Amino acid sequence: MRNFQIVFGFLLLLHLAGNAEAQAREVTVTVVDEQGQALARAVVSSQVVGSQTPASSTVIDQVERLFDPFISVVQVGATVNFPNSDNIRHQVFSFSPAKPFELPLYSNIEAPAVAFPNAGVVVLGCNIHDHMRAYLYVSAHPQSVLTDDSGQAQVTVAEGESEVRVWYPGLGNDPAAEFNVAVAAQQTQVQVQLPVAKQQQQAPEPSALQQRFNQLKQHVH
């Protein structure tokens, strides 16, 4: 009798899992800015488990005095490494409630790792270079997918009426503010226009001294 109950329970779980898959569908979400231009690296999230789940670890590098990438997505509890590929030192920090932290000045020899146990948006900066800014979206959703260069992301949603959530910097006074989008039954294509402009980092022009140093370095190589 005991063995029968175990087998029956296992078959029931398989049946429920199959029904859950049958009751979900793929939706292509296209995200554009206030001018109607494609927004790359917007975060599209769904409450349904899909083929893509947020990463458990990632790397945010520092290249030519810029964070790379500008926007990243990880799951709650993920670890992020912060290598420094520049030939100068950086000091990464964040005051965000989801994870306030500060790394000491370090060079490219080191790659400090930081864990992010709480969901939210972590705004990253460098104490040495004010223009450096990046965003880490720590997701509590089963799916959170970055849009590609054409502003598109594919996510799995529940059958029938559903919704997705879209995040991009500048949606509200709260850096973690999201845009909720209704998805109608049987709808497979959704376009979302966010009331934001495309954001990116912009490195300042190198000083005369830096230009001279770069010229000398190229001459040596």
Image (tube, rainbow, N blue to C red):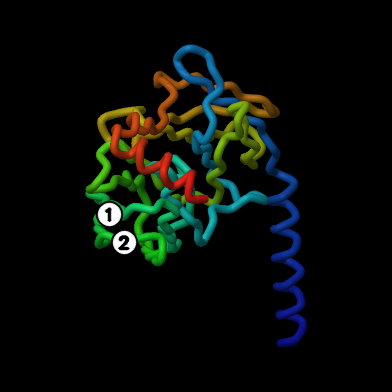
Dot 2: element: loop
Front in this rendered view, residue 70 or 127: 127
The kind of residue on which mark 2 rests is Tyr
Front in this rendered view, residue 96 or 213: 213
Q: Residues within 10 Å of mark 1 (few under 14, many from 20)?
A: some
Badge number at residue 106 = 2
Question: Residue 190, percent across and down?
Answer: 61, 24
Where on the picture, by quarter, is residue 174?
Answer: top left
Where, quadrant-wise, is the N terminus in this rendering? bottom right
- Tell whether label 1 touches label 2 (CB within 8 Å): yes
Where on the picture, by quarter, is residue 209?
Answer: top left
Q: CA distance from mark 2 to mark 1?
A: 7 Å
Front in this rendered view, residue 185 or 220: 220
Tag 1 residue: 91
Badge number at residue 75 = none
Front in this rendered view, residue 202 or 213: 213
Q: Residues within 10 Å of mark 2 (few under 14, many from 20)?
A: some
Q: Report the residue at 70% width, 44% height from top.
A: 23
Q: Earlier in the sequence, mark 2 or mark 1?
A: 1
Q: Report the residue at 42% width, 63% height from top.
A: 77
Measured along the vertical axis of the image, is residue 42 above or below residue 11? Answer: above
Q: Report the residue at 38% width, 30% height from top.
A: 202
* Horizontal side of residue 137 vs 128, given as left or right: right
Question: Residue 9, percent across and down?
Answer: 70, 73
The kind of residue on which mark 1 rests is Gln
Question: Residue 208, percent across and down?
Answer: 30, 32
Dot 1: element: loop
Question: Residue 120, percent across and down?
Answer: 35, 48
Q: Residue furthest top?
A: 35
Measured along the vertical axis of the image, is residue 115 above or below residue 24? Answer: below
